Amino acid sequence: MATRRSVLSGSLALAACAGAPAAPAAARPLKDMLPCPAGVCGMSGQFAEAGWRDLVVREFSQFTPEWEMKMEAILRPDGSLDFSRADVCADFAARHGLRLHGHALIWYSQGADQFAGLDKAAFGEAYDRYVLAVTSRYRGKVVSWDVVNEAVAEDGDGLRSHHWSQALGEIDHIRRAFDVAHTADPQAVLFLNDYNLENLPRKGATFLRLVETLLKAGTPVHGIGTQSHLDVEIAEGQIAGFFREAAEFGLQIHVSELDASLKSDRRLDLRPDGQRRAQQAARVTELTEAFMALPAAQRFAFTVWGARDPDSWLNRDARAGSGDEPLLFDASGAPTSMHAAVVGALPA
Ligand code: XIL
């Protein structure tokens, strides 16, 4: 299949041969180059910043609130619900014609405090009430939800154990959340979302076994969300392998939180920056090609976890510091080499 890269390199080569300076490719908006919604995350505190807002509206067609639709932003300690932050995000998306993806109804890392001390019956009622209230409120506004986020154990050996699974059952708490969300909004596309599914094949396999278990039980799982926080050092083929396996279920597939850090976990990284940038380009190319190899009906959206490099959570994590370049646009809003890798992997 001719890709944009092959056509582009061909034309550049011809131009070079003719002696004409190679004209930089006119970068059309990402949303016009992808055959599915181009998604981005962000926080309401960014909405007033023209540089961020203009880039998002120009390049993207789907929005994921990075924080405001999470339980910690909505559920108060006394059990009451504060939708003010989530509403600001819903309004922003509607005002700018962005499709809205809800993230995330149930997550292991949140909710323990608010649900502490509830007996099993009260816990279950509060669980259902929360999922019902949030999903119902955004019915017709949020088209899709990460219903359960990060259910698989960090090392891929089984599922996480946490307050939700301990109170309501390892599988049952997941089935329950999907059932309630589907009842609340039968039109919403419901996703099981997780990370390291490509980086750690064992975790990807456990995740897909969970999907199979849920589907066999009749759970309304409509989509697979692979966060794709890529480890640029993984072997070639891991990403494509996961996508081939995931595609077998015939579900929608959402690249839901793409970034590809140039920083190594190792404290002292002696490798030249160029090597990691080349690894980043290779893995992001593989991911984009694997996504594009899916049947069109299964390509839900291609979402990056931040608009510009400085917006990335990876540059806000105190441990990692700043200066990482894991996204498609740099601080000035110009396309990065990672953007070129995505675009180069799209059909001409
Ligand atoms: C991250 C946000 O980007 C940060 O701003 C926040 O401090 C922590 O959560 N997987 C997920 C996302 O599903 O919700 C996380 O987002 C990144 C990992």
Image (cartoon, grey):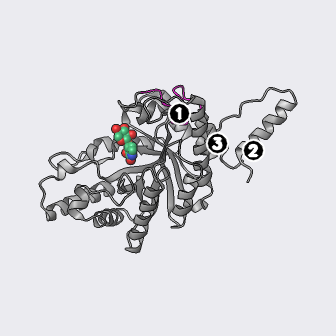
Quarter of the figure with residue 248: bottom right
- Residue 303 pos. (x, y %): 50, 46
Rate crowding at label 1 as few (under 14), some (14 to 19) or many (20 or more) other CA atoms within 10 Å: some
Rendering quadrant holding ligand 1: top left
- Residue 83 pos. (x, y %): 28, 46
Residue that badge 3 annotates: 343
Is residue 52 a member of the stretch shown in magenta?
Answer: no
Between disc 1 and disc 3, the foreground one is 3
Number of the label disc, if any, that sits on residue 6 = 2
Which of the pair 26/265 is nearer the observer? Answer: 265
- Residue 110 pos. (x, y %): 26, 48
Element marked by disc 3: helix
For this view, does 10 lie left or right of residue 315?
Answer: right
Q: Earlier in the sequence, mark 2 or mark 3?
A: 2
Number of the label disc, if any, that sits on residue 55 = 1
Element marked by disc 2: helix
Amino acid under disc 3 = Val
Distance between mark 1 and mark 3 Cα atoms: 17 Å
Check mark 2 vs ligand 1: CB closer than 8 Å? yes or no.
Answer: no
Quadrant of image for the N terminus: bottom right
For this view, does 100 lie left or right of residue 76?
Answer: right
For this view, does 237 lie left or right of residue 159?
Answer: right
Distance between mark 2 and mark 3 Cα atoms: 11 Å
Does residue 206 lie above or below 25 as drawn? below
The magenta region covers: 322-335
Amino acid under disc 1 = Leu
- At a point 18% along the width and 53% down the height, the residue shown is 115
Check mark 1 vs ligand 1: CB closer than 8 Å? yes or no.
Answer: no
Q: Earlier in the sequence, mark 1 or mark 3?
A: 1
Q: Earlier in the sequence, mark 2 or mark 1?
A: 2
Dominant SS in magenta: loop
